[in-house]
Every structure is written in C-alpha cells, then in structure tokens.
Image (spheres, rainbow, N blue to C red):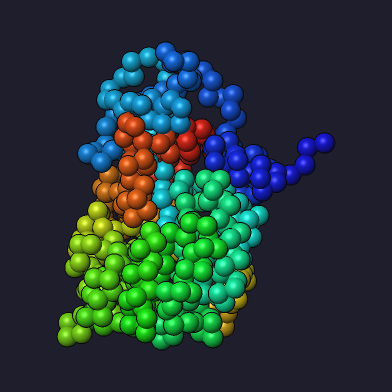
C-alpha cells in the first residue's frame, strides 16, 4: 500500500522537479505527469534527453521574444527566436520567465521555518514552488541562541539536499525599538563569537544575517559575518544616516525589507532609507504586497535603486497559501485577517501571505515595470545577492532550467526546476 510522501521523498522530488501528488500544497496548476512531456523529449547526440519548448514568449534580460528554448540535462542549451528548428512542446504563446528567487521567507502552507522542523520546511518549499519559487532561502526569527542553533542544524540538511538555498538569521541582533514581530525579550547585542557558534551549527549554510548597525558590537559582527561568506543585511534598525553608512562600509550589502522596521525617510534627518538607497553597493529588499509599503514608495525605491539593486521578497509566514487564522511566528502568535498578518491583539505587521508570482504581477501592474524588469527584481537580482547569478536567474543558455510559464494574465501555468516539471502547463 502506498503511504503519504515522506520528507525525504518529497525533498528529492522537489530537488529534481517531480513533485509527488500527495505533497501538501495550495491550489494551483495540476502536478505534472512525467509521461506527458514525452512527445517533446528527444535524445540528443550524446544520448541525453533534450526538451524543446516552442511557441513561447520568452522573457530574457534584453526583451520579450517570440521563440523557443531547448533544455538538456537540467540546463538551458539554446534560446532562439521564431519557429523552433525541430519538434517541440508548444506553450501556445504563453510567457516563459526565470524561476523566482526568494531570499526572505519565513513559511507557508501552515508551516514555519523558525520551527526548525524539516517536515514543515518541505511543505513550505512545495507550496512556494507551485507559485514559481525555484530558489528559496529559509528565514528564521529572533529566538534563543540554542534554538537558533538547533533550527539551523535541522535545516542545513535540506540545504545540502538542494531544497533550500540557505538560512537567514533575521535576529536576534536587532533594535528593540524597531523589532516588529520579534520577541523583544530575546534580543541580544551582536557578538562575533556567538555568531561563529551559530554559523558552525548551520554547517556552512547560513547565508544571511540581519543586524542593526547602531548596536554595540554590530560593526565587528558584520565584519565577522562577511569574513565567513555570510551576507550582512541592515534592518530592524534605529540607526541614523551616518551609522547606516558605517554598517555598509563594514561590509553590509542588503537592506532587509526597506522602509519597514526602520526610521522613515526625512528631508532633515534622511535616516537609513536614504543611505541604503543611495549606496550602489547595497541591494534593497521590498515587500510589495500592498500592505507593507505604499505603491508610491515602492516606485520611488525601484527608480532610485534600479532593477539591478532591487530584490522583491515575500517575507511570507505560515499563512501563505493556507488562509486566515492564528499561526506561530517563532515564539509569537500571529492573527491573519483578510490575508494581512499581525501580532495577536492587533499589533505589528508580522510577515505577509505573499507569494512570488503575486509579487511579479504587482511589479508589472502596480510598479509599472516591464516584464524583463519584473523578472530581474524577482529572479536575477536576488540570485546575484546569493552569488548564484552565473547559474540561474535568467532565461539564458548555459543556466539552470528553472522556469515559470505564465499565461496572459501572468498567472502561473507551469513550473520547471532543474529541467523537470513541478507543475505542468
């Protein structure tokens, strides 16, 4: 008798792209039947299977082209214009964009990365994969060092399996005045030595640390993070303009959800927002769910930083794909009403219920970005943050075949990871 998919079997399936039908996921395109792609799969000269996607509107960094692409051994081998040179799987004029890259995500499908539970993490990844996210970083929230170490150790195995792209510590080295949906009782002063212990627990898979630049020890901790190949991000911070610049000079290269959990932009006191937007070394995260930031301020940030320094993120929590209700975000309770997550009792915004496909649509409709620009801020720029832009983030020959097929309304019609369908168009 066949039982439900285990964490191990589902992890392997998500890594290769063949998602079992029994994997919990939100409603979306039907799970692929591997046999359905057979008619368009051809054996190449070296015996490897080659798949051609034809009759597509291919979104590349230099524009949108009517054309085709060929995939072999999990990679894009050719991208062409016009009619495909041989038999192919027709996409009927639908768009092909690169798989989305989400570098700030706390959960979904009822699961939470901060729990440090691999079973929940697999469920989260499955949900977001069905919405087009093929590269996903797990974000934790403020907790005790012991819990963070345990959670990082538990999730490191999924990074080694290729399910997750890394682990992000959003806390505990953040400002009490700007802690948002973090437990203020668990905040700590930055410590390079303590950080090294947390990195050791993550077995080399901790990729990002959010830190408030104004805290004692912050600049030394930023330097320690960078020395250990960890991306330092400034956020949940009450720093002024000058101290934020000092954090950047120490090595910080990302702004954690710009505007949120930091002093506002002012004409006499520019604060961290101006410092982060003006410095070309910094990539700014933006949560464009219609709740976190007004569209006018999103447009301002996008124009100031440009698509090459703007990374749209979900900041999603457990309710993404799971509906309204009460959820956990680390040690805190979160109430979700009409898709908006707040700390129980009507407190601070506590993450979002956003998915990356919705972020892509909003980038086009609300921010006025072109399709190539929307692909850049949801794929290529976040891939560059992770140092992965040489292998993913755009529909380019030689890169990994992580792709999303979108219909005319920019809704997900299919998702491919490593050359295999997760959901089939």
Q: Nearer the viewer, residue 230 or 360?
A: 230
Residue occupying the point 28% across, 22% down: 82
Q: Nearer the viewer, residue 176 or 270?
A: 176
- Give the vertical position of 298 relative to 128 (above or below): below
Q: Position of residue 132 (x, y in %)?
A: 46, 46
Q: Position of residue 93 (x, y in %)?
A: 37, 30
- Give the vertical position of 206 relative to 213 (above or below): above
- Give the vertical position of 278 relative to 343 (above or below): above
- Tell me if 349 is positioned left or right of 270 in this view: right
- Tell me if 334 is positioned left or right of 105 in this view: right
Q: Position of residue 86 (x, y in %)?
A: 37, 14
- Tell me if 248 is positioned left or right of 162 in this view: left
Q: Is residue 292 visible?
A: no
Q: Is residue 24 visible?
A: yes
- Give the vertical position of 10 relative to 43 (above or below): below
Figure quadrant of residue 161 = top right
Residue occupying the point 60% across, 30% down: 33
Residue extending farthest front = 193
Q: Position of residue 120 (x, y in %)?
A: 63, 57
Residue extending farthest right = 1
Q: Nearer the viewer, residue 135 or 143?
A: 143
Residue extending farthest left = 268
Residue occupying the point 55% across, 55% down: 156
Of the 4 image quadrants, the one containing the N terminus is: top right
């Amino acid at each position: 008798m066949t039982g439900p998919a285990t964490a191990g079997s589902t992890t392997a399936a998500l890594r290769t792209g063949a998602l079992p039908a029994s994997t919990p996921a939100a409603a979306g395109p039907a799970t692929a039947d591997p046999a359905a792609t057979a008619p368009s799969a051809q054996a190449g000269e070296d015996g490897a299977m080659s798949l051609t996607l034809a009759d597509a509107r291919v979104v590349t960094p230099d524009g949108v082209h009517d054309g085709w692409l060929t995939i072999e051994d999990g990679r894009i081998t050719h991208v062409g214009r016009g009619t495909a040179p041989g038999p192919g799987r027709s996409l009927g004029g639908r768009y092909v964009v690169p798989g989305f890259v989400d570098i700030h995500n706390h959960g979904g499908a009822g699961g939470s990365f901060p729990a440090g539970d691999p079973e929940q993490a697999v469920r989260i990844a499955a949900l977001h994969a069905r919405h087009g996210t093929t590269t996903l970083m797990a974000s934790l929230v403020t907790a005790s060092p012991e819990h963070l170490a345990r959670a990082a150790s538990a999730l490191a195995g999924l990074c080694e399996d290729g399910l997750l792209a890394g682990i992000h510590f959003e806390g505990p080295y953040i400002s009490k005045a700007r802690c948002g949906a973090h437990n203020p009782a668990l905040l700590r002063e930055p410590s390079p030595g303590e950080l090294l212990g947390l990195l050791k627990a993550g077995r080399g898979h901790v990729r990002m640390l959010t830190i408030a630049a104004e805290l004692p020890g912050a600049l030394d901790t930023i330097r320690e993070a960078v020395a250990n190949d960890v991306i330092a991000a400034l956020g949940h911070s009450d720093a002024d303009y000058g101290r934020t610049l000092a954090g950047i000079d120490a090595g910080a290269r990302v702004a954690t959800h710009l505007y949120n959990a930091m002093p506002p932009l002012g004409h006499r006191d520019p604060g961290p927002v101006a410092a982060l937007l003006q410095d070309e070394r910094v990539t700014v995260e933006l949560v464009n769910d219609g709740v976190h930031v007004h569209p006018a301020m999103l447009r301002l940030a996008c124009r100031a930083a440009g698509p090459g320094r703007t990374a749209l993120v979900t900041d999603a929590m457990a309710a993404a794909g799971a509906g309204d209700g009460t959820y956990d975000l680390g040690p805190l309770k979160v109430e979700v009403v009409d898709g908006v997550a707040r700390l129980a009792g009507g407190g601070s915004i506590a993450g979002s219920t956003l998915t990356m496909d919705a972020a892509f649509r909003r980038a086009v409709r609300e921010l006025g970005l072109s399709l190539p620009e929307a692909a850049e801020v949801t794929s290529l720029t976040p891939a560059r943050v992770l140092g992965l832009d040489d292998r993913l983030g755009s529909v380019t020959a030689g890169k990994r075949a992580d792709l999303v097929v979108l219909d005319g309304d920019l809704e997900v019609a299919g998702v491919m990871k490593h050359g295999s369908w997760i959901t089939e168009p």
